[in-house]
Amino acid sequence: MTSAVEGISPRPTPTMRASVLVKAGEVVMQQRPTPTPAADEVLVRVTAVGVCGSDVHFYKDGHLGDWTLDGPLVLGHESGGVIVAVGAHVSPTRIGQRVSVEPQHPSTQSAESLRGDYNLDPAMKFYAIPGTDGAFQEYVTIQSHFAHEIPDAVSDWAAALLEPLSVAVASARKACITAGDRVLITGAGPVGLALAQVARASGAAEIIVTDISEGRRASALKFGATSVLDPSADASAIASLNADSFIDASGAAPAVWSGIEALRPGGRAVLVGMGQSTLPLPVGRIQSHELILTGVFRYANTWPAAIALAATGQVDLDAMVTGTFTLEQAQDALESTADPATIKSIVEPHRV
């Protein structure tokens, strides 16, 4: 875990190393020109990148949801670093700032952006989605307002993991978690563990996390869960929870079904995990209990809250890191997620 900027040159090198997915299962190192920031952009020297499940899907399967790998792609969308150059319309005083990157570039003129839902812009350019390279490289550019300055209390690792924490913040907002609530979270991966911490910070009295993995259930107890359940062995206990809100971070069809049935009348269900594109749902229960069912797609306007949660210690992102890798080891980082003991792997592009 690092947070210092000593030794970082204010002048980026003309070329950079990049770890490139050329086809499913094959990652190669390439030398590429260092990008030049547009007028409203900054150039960030990447210090840390988290490995996300979406990266793993592209690496293993060559596709994710409706997106299909159609050419070489740099993976990685959870990143942080140091600003080393700025575009013509950005103040040079930003050079040297440590930042967390919000990895999206929406149109400023879309109806979605104009109403504040910029994450839903249909023309969005998002890191590590075919057509837009991600952060498994030494430098990236991003619009200056999406390079969020971070305090010294936030480490380089945490700067990168503010991205999955933002997913958790967006999900907790959709679930309307408040003081005294009973919250059910299905799935104890990185987002589920971040969700448990956000729910605790939001004042939830009970935070129940389910996962089929005994090891992940044990991790959940360390990251905010007040209790954990095995969805196979404890199905009846889950069904009787009468939870105020349910957030699925697994994408598993049985978890979605059981979570909805665990809600009290008028409760809220929020679907975060990416699984099957279509699922059977207990429509009768949704109607008769007037349940509110919604989804979460990335995030909007979440970074300030995420930074505050990490900086004040209400959420511990550093403790979620279970392995670090060099840029040349990016493929090993992607493979590491198959280990049940892995919570979050970090690639450090400038580490040798």
Image (tube, rainbow, N blue to C red):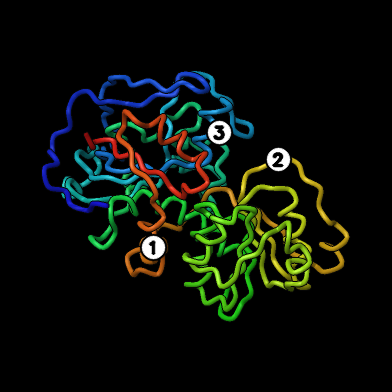
Q: Give whichever of discs 2 and 1 has the lower sequence position.
A: 2
In this rendering, the label closer to the viewer, 2 or 1: 1
> How dense is the environment of label 2, judged by Cα within 10 Å: few (below 14), some, or many (20 and up)?
few
Q: Amino acid at mark 2?
A: Gln
Residue labelled with disc 1 = 316
- The answer to whether one can see residue 176 in this image is no
- Marks 1 and 3 sit apart, C-alpha to C-alpha, by 26 Å
Q: Amino acid at mark 3?
A: His
Residue labelled with disc 2 = 276
Q: Residue at x 27, y 52 (%)?
A: 1
Q: Residue furthest bottom?
A: 180
In the depicted structure, whether residue 81 falls above or below residue 177: above
- Marks 2 and 3 sit apart, C-alpha to C-alpha, by 13 Å
Q: Residue at x 23, y 45 (%)?
A: 82
Nearest the eye: 82 or 86: 82
> How dense is the environment of label 1, judged by Cα within 10 Å: few (below 14), some, or many (20 and up)?
some
Q: Position of residue 31 (x, y in %)?
A: 28, 19
- The answer to whether one can see residue 183 in this image is yes
Q: Residue at x 66, y 68 (%)?
A: 245
Q: Position of residue 58 (x, y in %)?
A: 53, 30
In the depicted structure, whether residue 83 falls above or below residue 63: below
- Marks 2 and 1 sit apart, C-alpha to C-alpha, by 30 Å
Q: Which mark is residue 57?
A: 3
SS under mark 3: helix
C-beta proximity under 8 Å, tags 1 and 3: no
Q: Give whichever of discs 1 and 3 has the lower sequence position.
A: 3
Q: Amino acid at mark 1?
A: Asp
**Left or right side of 21 for 15:** left
C-beta proximity under 8 Å, tags 2 and 1: no
Q: Position of residue 282 (x, y in %)?
A: 84, 56
SS under mark 1: loop
